[in-house]
Image (cartoon, helix red, strand yellow):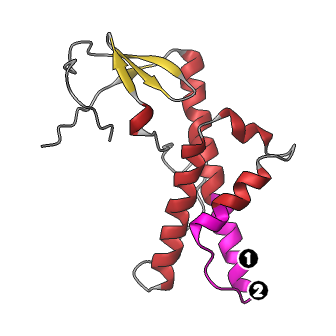
Amino acid sequence: MITSFKVRLEPNNKQISKLFQSAGAARWAYNWTLARQEENYKNGGKFIKDGDLRKELTILKRTEELKWLNKYSNNITKQAVKDACNAYYRFFKGLSEKPKFKSRKKSQPQFYQDTEKTKFKDGKVRLEKMGWVKLSEKNRIPEDTKYIML
């Protein structure tokens, strides 16, 4: 049986800004993927698989313009590319409407956090490339439980 815990984080000001910046990196990767897919489609190309786009993004991260993406976990951009490709694929199959670009004002700030790299200890949670963040309820999570973060 898998048990999940919903917890509230109490980040400090630096961590709050880092969380919003991580959501911005995910939004940028999602929008970049949609733009790349649309450009390819207009030029008569077929659907680009997410693995190919992730390889292309990794190469682009080495340039000066996109070096800022290295401050954030690679899983954030990887999952955003996967989500955008999945949305575009569903559009091509006729299962959903055309995916829209995410905006800073209208879309909810969210990003993927790898569960394998998440650790809990003494009423805190360790998030990748962010450090230890306080939990509002310190005794909510038992110490001997295997955690899956949702």
Check disc 1 and report the residue beneath it.
39
Q: In the figure, residue 38 lies in which quadrant?
A: bottom right
Return the residue nearer the eye: 38 or 97: 38
Spot occupied by residue 73 in the image (x, y as percentages of width and height): 59, 38
Asked whether 145 falls inside the magenta stretch, the response is no
The residue located at (64%, 59%) in the rendering is 54
Secondary-structure class at tag 2:
loop
Q: Counting other residues with Cα less than 10 Å from the Cα at mark 1, is it few (<14), some (14-19), or many (20 or more)?
A: few
Spot occupied by residue 91 in the image (x, y as percentages of width and height): 49, 79
Q: Is residue 145 above or below residue 76?
A: above
Work out whether residue 97 can be spotted.
no
Check disc 2 and report the residue beneath it.
43
Asked whether 34 falls inside the magenta stretch, the response is yes
Magenta-tinted stretch: 31-53
Q: Quadrant of the N terminus?
A: top left
Spot occupied by residue 109 in the image (x, y as percentages of width and height): 51, 43
Q: In the figure, residue 125 lies in which quadrant?
A: top left
Spot occupied by residue 13 in the image (x, y as percentages of width and height): 56, 16
